[in-house]
Amino acid sequence: MRIHSIEAFPVPPRWIFVRLETDEGVVGWGESIVARRLGAVLGALEDLAETVRGEDAARIEDLWQRMYRGGFFRGGPILSTAAAAIETPLWDVRARTLGAPIHELLGGRVRERVRLYAWVGGDRPGNVVEDARARVEQGFTAVKMNAVAEMHVLDSASKLEAVVARVASVRQALWPELGIAVDFHGRVHRAMARQLLRALEPFGLMWVEEPLRPEHSDLLASLAASTTIPLAAGERVHNRWEVKPLLEQRALAVIQPDVSLTGLFELEKIARMAEAYDVAVAPHCPNGPISLAASLQVDACCGNVVIQEQSLGIHYNRGFAGLERGEMHDYLRDAIPLTPVDGHLPVPAGPGLGIEVDEEAVRSRSGRWRLPDPAWRNPDGTLAEW
């Protein structure tokens, strides 16, 4: 069975779906991210499609190696997300051909369901109590919020106090068992991060995410030594070689790779690596249904996965930056496999990814869109991290 065609579909609100078909008519689906670089991703997909078209669709690892290593220059988010979106449907095709879910090809399931968390607030977080209460009413037992918007290298005490007040309001309004994660999103610099972590310690957080920019990941160990809060990072890594130094620091309690950057098999490999360092895995996925379905296949067979991100109701889906609205279920023939129950999703039972993509909906809503850069700035005019 050989790869016949690869098509990319940019769809609302900010997703890129990839359809792969074999010469025997078997179809698999993948998903790319890096939405603010749509043209670059589509170009990379076209280039890599030329590399694999006509090749044996069963040679998944070999094809991933070719996409990763074959161009001499390698890595980075653009090439990585393009390769991931081609590798994932190869797993979908292979498992469908065998009439099995993908996790059965990766050792079989170790759990029956996967715990989820939901986003509250937004990029400039507000209404967190109301949003968190709504999520609890939907059955979720864990939520995540951004900590701050713009923050300078050294900033005001009032910004730190506002973060603490938001977290305290959620903790006090809802039951003590609610899991709360706070995302610094790489916006907080080291001096402020130390102060903020210390101030947040009384609230029993699940973790603080991306406490520093990825360029400063060598400082995570010193930051971890200064706090009792578990630290999480890894959504911007692309492969096991980039995860290796993060694990070797012994600074992280949670690693958060994104299947739309790593690919499905690489995500599984990273989870196995993390297990050897006693590090939990919480796959990053504020993305579409194909990314979530792929993540669930790895969640199913890796015991150190503790929780899964998902995008239902996230602020990005509500016409983000003026774009058309979109939700995961808009592109599925059957929403049930990706409909949370009591804050969990069952391990997928269907063949391949365990979902059926509504191709007609994908094609009808596909179209080039432009997601602008936020260009956040501090009051003095310097660029602030988004």
Image (cartoon, rainbow, N blue to C red):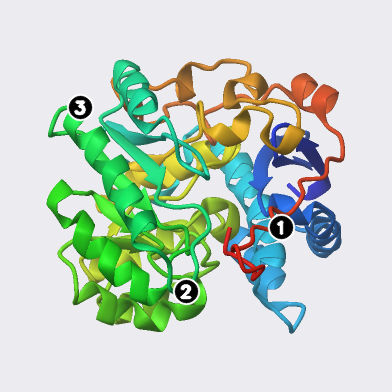
Residue 64 in the image: above or below residue 163 = below
As shown in the figure, which amino acid type bears the numbered disc 2?
Answer: Val
Q: Residues within 10 Å of mark 3 (few under 14, many from 20)?
A: few
Q: Disc 3 and disc 2: Cα gap in Å?
A: 33 Å
Which residue is tagged 2?
Answer: 153
Residue 308 in the image: above or below residue 360 = below
- Where residue 168 sits in the image (x, y, percent)? 22, 41
Judging depth in this view, the residue of 273 and 287 nearest the camera is 287
Asked whether the residues under the numbered discs 1 and 2 touch, taking CB atoms below 8 Å apart as contact, a structural biologist would say no
Which residue is tagged 3?
Answer: 174
* Mark closer to the observer (1, 2): 2
Q: Earlier in the sequence, mark 1 or mark 3?
A: 1
* Mark closer to the observer (1, 3): 3
As shown in the figure, which amino acid type bears the numbered disc 1?
Answer: Ala
Q: Earlier in the sequence, mark 1 or mark 2?
A: 1
Describe the element under mark 1 as helix, strand or loop: helix
**Residue 253 in sight here:** no
| Residue at 78% from the left image edge and 49% from the top image edge | 3
For residue 384, the mark is none
| Residue at 77% from the left image edge and 78% from the top image edge | 71
**Residue 177 in sight here:** yes
- Where residue 255 sits in the image (x, y, percent)? 36, 61
- Where residue 351 sits in the image (x, y, percent)? 52, 30
For residue 82, the mark is 1
